[in-house]
Image (cartoon, rainbow, N blue to C red):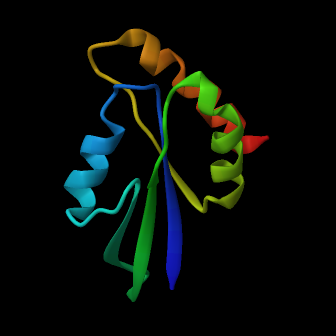
Amino acid sequence: MLYKLVVLGDGGVGKTALTIQLCLNHFVDSYRKQVVIDDQPCVLEVLDTAGQEEYTALRDQWIRDGEGFLLVYSITSRSTFERIERFRNQIFR
């Protein structure tokens, strides 16, 4: 079984660092990790998205294709935390 996890957040908040830490093996901007969900072995495909505004159209496509979402912000930047709500709203539209 394969689940797609989309990593969202502003640029520079650590999405790539978290993804690399989770998966260790990486491709260009997509990572795969063998995991167990509900006692079933499966592959988690993690898409590390660009946080910049110019990637909005791509982000919309990634959200449509995603089956799970990890919203990331920097603990040293309140504005990145406040923008998490925007990403959440995009997911639920």
Q: Is residue 70 left or right of residue 91?
A: left
Q: Write the residue at 51% across / 79% down.
A: 2
Measured as percent of width and height from the top left, residue 84 is found at: 53, 27
* Residue situated in front as seen by the camera: 4 or 30: 30
Q: Write the residue at 53% across / 65% down.
A: 4
Q: Is residue 86 left or right of residue 72?
A: right
Quadrant in the rendering for residue 40: bottom left
Q: Write the residue at 26% across / 14% down.
A: 76
Measured as percent of width and height from the top left, residue 90 is found at: 70, 36
Measured as percent of width and height from the top left, residue 66 is found at: 61, 58
Say if 40 sits above or below 15 in the image. Answer: below
Q: Write the residue at 32% across / 43% down.
A: 16
Q: Quadrant of the C terminus?
A: top right
Say if 33 sits above or below 29 in the image. Answer: below
What is the number of callouts on the image?
0
Quadrant in the rendering for residue 23: bottom left
Report the residue that reaches farthest toward the right: 93
Measured as percent of width and height from the top left, residue 7 is found at: 46, 46
* Residue situated in front as seen by the camera: 33 or 68: 33
Q: Is residue 29 left or right of residue 64?
A: left
Quadrant in the rendering for residue 24: bottom left
